[in-house]
Image (cartoon, rainbow, N blue to C red):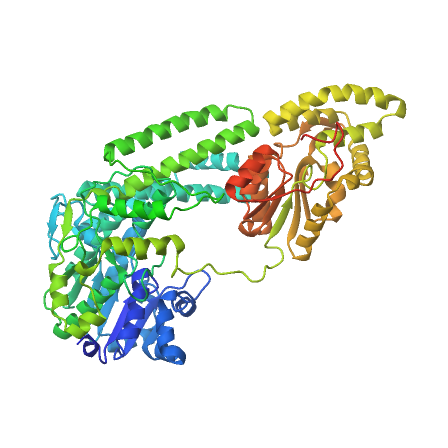
Amino acid sequence: MLVEAYRGKTVLLTGGTGFLGTALVEKMLRSLPELQRLYLLVRPSRDKGAKERFEKDMLGSPAFSRLREELGDGFEERVAEKVRVLEGDVHTDSLGLGAEDLAELSREVDAVIHSAASVVFDAPLDAAVDSNVRGTLGLLALAGTWEKAPLFVHVSTTYVAGTKPGLIPEEIPGEHSPNGTRLDPKGEVALLGGVVREVEEASRERGLARQFGTEARRELGMVGEETEVAERVEQLRRAWVRERLVERGNERARELGWQDVYTFTKSLAERRVLEERGDLPLIILRPAIIESSVAEPHPGWIQGSRMADPIIMAFARGILREFPGDPESIVDFVPVDHVVNALISAVARGLSVRPAEPEVYQVASGQRNPIRYREFYEYVREFFLANPLRDSGGRPIPVPEWSFPGHRRVEGKLKAELVALNIAGKLTARMPGGHLKTDLRGRAARAEKRARMSLYFSRIYGTYGSMESIFSSARVYELYRSLPEEDRSVFPFDIAQVDWKAWLQQTHLPAITHKPGRKKRRVVSKERPGEVAAIFDVDGTLVASNVVSHYAWLKMRDLPAALRPAWAASFVLRVPLYWALDKVSRTHFNRVFYKNYKGWKPARARALGKESFSGYVLKRLYPEALATLRAHKEAGHRVVLLSGALDFVIAPFEDLVDDVLTARLEEENGVYTGELSGAPIAGEARARMLASFARRRNLDLSRSYAYADSISDLPMLEAVGNPVAVNPDGRLAKAARERGWRIRDWRKKDAPGPLDGGF
């Protein structure tokens, strides 16, 4: 019996905090009471040590709710008795462990289960090799020196077969790659290391450095300090390196017959383990696509987003309108609890017989219980027709109907769409800045995002949706049949017993759409002062005014009383022009309108600005706006005014808030030139200024608030986690409704005069 096979045995597990690892730990603690000790090698995260990760991220997972209920007060005692957490990392020498821990592992460990890996299909080449190959070999070499010469269990994937068609047997890889190229695994790893060094050196060439510098300054504009520019240059360099390493890794993988760098490096790991294992008994376990559980720890338990889930959700959201899958190809799903039970059984056999030759087990469904791509699509579409997702406005999202036109047609159509959008983007870029440009760019950006995401899914997952491979699982079924009836009941993994339609529609799809069993985001119970900001636009948001009417008030105060009527009459004639200019481009309007201040003396402007606060602004200040501003102050939030108005107009607000960010005019010979110092604070420039300010003040924009009234403020509102459209114009109101944002009406009952409204 399996329980007896583990009596007094000690196991070391890597990757225990992952999806498969979490399910494995839970099952071993619940169903293998005679297991002596389970060592978990856990890498610390940026903000948590290994023990805290284990206790909060792992034991806090809903995966352990059943065991907690069964053991009650004895849960902590069981965990303390059976589990020892070791803070370390397979990527470091000696796992990052001290001499005492290593000596203990050497004396105690009977089996090593190596589950840690990078499962990203488009990982950079260096990260994939380090995680999947070098980390595995480091652990293997260490285990080879231990007293008990432990069983080494390497968790791989069925997709190490690459694009090779036909029946894929449960056997060790041969000397050739999937397309028949003779392969030297050790030499190949060395070659890949050379590629990484080559790309890194290329990224530091002088021409690229200049290019990164130009791009950084263009992005940050006038709001970027030198340190920020340098940081952005390094970010651009690293992004360039990452992109090239992704390309080079996948190019090499496909050149040899693998789908991507993930399957390529996992196969290299298998081959290198076979070369370096020495006398250690070895088991290679190859699961196919691991998805949510059938039954344990509870039906539909899942953690994170698995391989098929992004495609399913993109389809349900109407993003993926076609996919280059072969409707007759097999989608090889395996529930996570089946993989766990097969792994426990394979390890038990290895502990009992210590096989002299490596053993391979493939946990797959394609041979004994195949589900074809067309069936999968039909089951998923049927579910979302009955249970559609909803958009931000609460409307059901219609699901597309796929026709399976083939890989070339799908990608060809998407590439043509991206070319058209690129041309449209270049034409839009030539337009003057303003609302129309912002609207068009927003629509194009959304369409481009949808097309790029579809193309990404096609390139990353397309080969998996049109495979001609069938993974044999005969040895896994033989292993299952060798178990006593009682073990088959407690540790089931006969894939033929799974009803795919029922599992998808009643278990898996509800799990990934409603996310029961997923870890909830940590709720921040108390906001620390200084981390959250409340950003307010001024004209039209806090005050029933605009820069035109405010200028008129200032100008009238600066003129002799006898001249005021004539000036007002002539100025009113220009208001329609300003109104029309603002509707086309707030940026262009600001540049043109602020020329009215040419020749003004700064001292006189500041005096008039101060006078206008009591004589003009306070009468137009919205009471709800003032109450909201005070509420944010009381909550400890940093209150910021971000306005395209001029500094001497906004200066009187400084006593009410923490920071004021405004436009300024250039001075020459003691007077204003009428030209702005820097870009107008409107549209994307306003969002860039906010981002730069947030970095300097260490603000968390994802938790911050922003209040604004105009479509030109859309980029600023999109930059925060809590946007509020206040007294919005028609276009901003529409955008806010589409995004599900809050909309507030702070308008006064008194109607604005001819110089008070419209901007």
Give residue 239's position: percent from left, percent from top.
40, 43
Q: Nearer the viewer, residue 588 or 188?
A: 588
Q: Is residue 623 left or right of residue 614?
A: left
Give residue 521's position: percent from left, percent from top.
46, 58
Quadrant for the C terminus in the image: top right
Give residue 662's position: percent from left, percent from top.
67, 38
Q: Is residue 420 above or below residue 528?
A: above
Q: Is residue 244 left or right of residue 140?
A: right
Q: Is residue 577 above or below residue 149?
A: above
Residue for point 31% across, 72% down: 39
Q: Is residue 605 left or right of residue 348?
A: right
Q: Nearer the viewer, residue 131 or 59?
A: 59
Q: Nearer the viewer, residue 429 or 69?
A: 69
Give residue 70's position: percent from left, percent from top.
35, 76
- Outermost residue, front direction? 386
Quarter residue 203 falls in: top left
